[in-house]
Image (cartoon, rainbow, N blue to C red):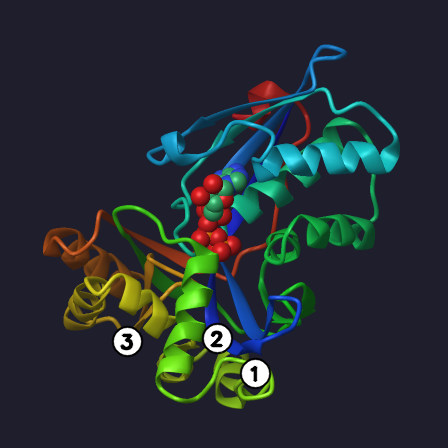
Amino acid sequence: MITVRVPAKVNVQLGVGGLRADGFHDLANVFFAVALGDEVTATAGAPGSGVTLACTGPDADQVPLDGSNLAARAARLLAARHGIEADVHLAIAKAIPVAGGMAGGSADGAAALVACDALWGLDTPLPVLLELAAELGSDVPFALLGGVALGRGRGELLEPLPVAGSFHWVFAVAEGGLSTPAVFRECDRLREADGTGSGADRVPTPDPSAELLAALAAGDPVALAEALSNDLQQAALSLRPELADCLRAGLEAGALAGLVSGSGPTCAFLAKDAAGAEAVAEALAASGTCRAAHPTHGPVPGARPLDTVGPAAAV
Ligand code: ATP
């Protein structure tokens, strides 16, 4: 039995270019891994059992337990790559909000790759795991790496970035999720409606912000707060206008800055320090503008086994 812990992500910059002919957008995407995360436990299945799944946690009823689950797809992809049978039970302990803009499904895919690789004794080299991760989805490679990284292309071409120290965050979880493709479509619709246009010929390819990279390298939360940006925020707010109340409540509670996490609807708040994050989380939980508020920190490493010795140590 192998248990792997995997982080959620917040995009400290999400620059969205124009709509490409292949339906994707070019992104300048700075991923930041936070300690709020899922755990995936892989247990050997009987020969011929295939991949079986279970999920626990507050959002467990929203997680598909069929072959479409990213953890199941990851296990099958890894097994196929090595020409072996994917006989494994995957138990997902889910803390990352589902369809929350924190790449929870991608995280479980990355965790399943690492867990099955260890369980089956495959020792797959990291570049191959990253290739399989990119096949599963644009956000999966980052969940393997963790830390802070610049993602180009669809987000799958990753370059780790230097960061000093630790930053303190609060994540305000909303009722219900938002579909990432629907938020990108709304972003395109708003760009058409305001006359900008949505095509790759009209919207310049975004670049990473020099101020943001400097703030990360300096470990400066005040400078990072000023540099945070998310080109999907307006679209998420257009689909969920009540998120503005949550963003306001976090700022009133003393957060340095607040932004929609990825495609939303989770809102992320940067705090000055750990005590500041506790205070913001308490105020948000009492504000009635979100379902729950979690203080956390980052950056943290990507998907890693808790222990590879045995069940007692893995608990
Ligand atoms: P992203 O930020 O990468 O766009 P997200 O965090 O908004 O994604 P996810 O939590 O990854 O969204 O869920 C998106 C959809 O993926 C869910 O509605 C669900 O149908 C599907 N899904 C597949 N596998 C999983 C999984 N292991 N956990 C959660 N959702 C999953």
Q: Does label 1 point to a residue whose CB lies under 8 Å from ligand 1?
A: no
The residue lying toward the viewer, choosing from 207 and 124, is: 207
Query: Tag 3, which secondary structure?
Result: loop
Where is residue 30 shown, x and y percent of the image? 54, 72
Instruction: Tell me the quarter of the image containing the N terminus.
Output: top right
Describe the element under mark 2 as helix, strand or loop: strand
- Residue receiving disc 1: 208
Residue visible at 21% across and 68% down in the picture: 244
Q: Nearer the viewer, residue 217 or 98?
A: 98
Residue named by callout 3: 256
User: Does residue 14 appear to the left or right of 22 in the view shown?
Assistant: left
Earlier in the chain: of badge 1 and badge 2, it is 2
Residue 88: in sight, yes or no? Answer: yes
Q: Do the residues labelled 1 and 2 touch (CB within 8 Å)?
A: yes
Residue at image point 59% right, 54% down = 301
Read off the residue under disc 2.
Answer: 13
Measured in 3D between alpha carbons, the distance from the residue under mark 1 to the one under mark 2, in whole angstroms, is 7 Å
Q: Which of 199 and 122 is in front in this view?
A: 199
Q: Cα distance, mark 2 to mark 3?
A: 16 Å
- Residue at (33% x, 34% y) in the render: 58
Query: Would you place residue 104 above or below residue 83 in this image?
Result: below
Residue 105: x percent and y percent? 52, 44
Amino acid at the residue labelled 1: Pro
The three-letter code of the residue at mark 2 reads Gln
Q: Residue furthest right?
A: 83
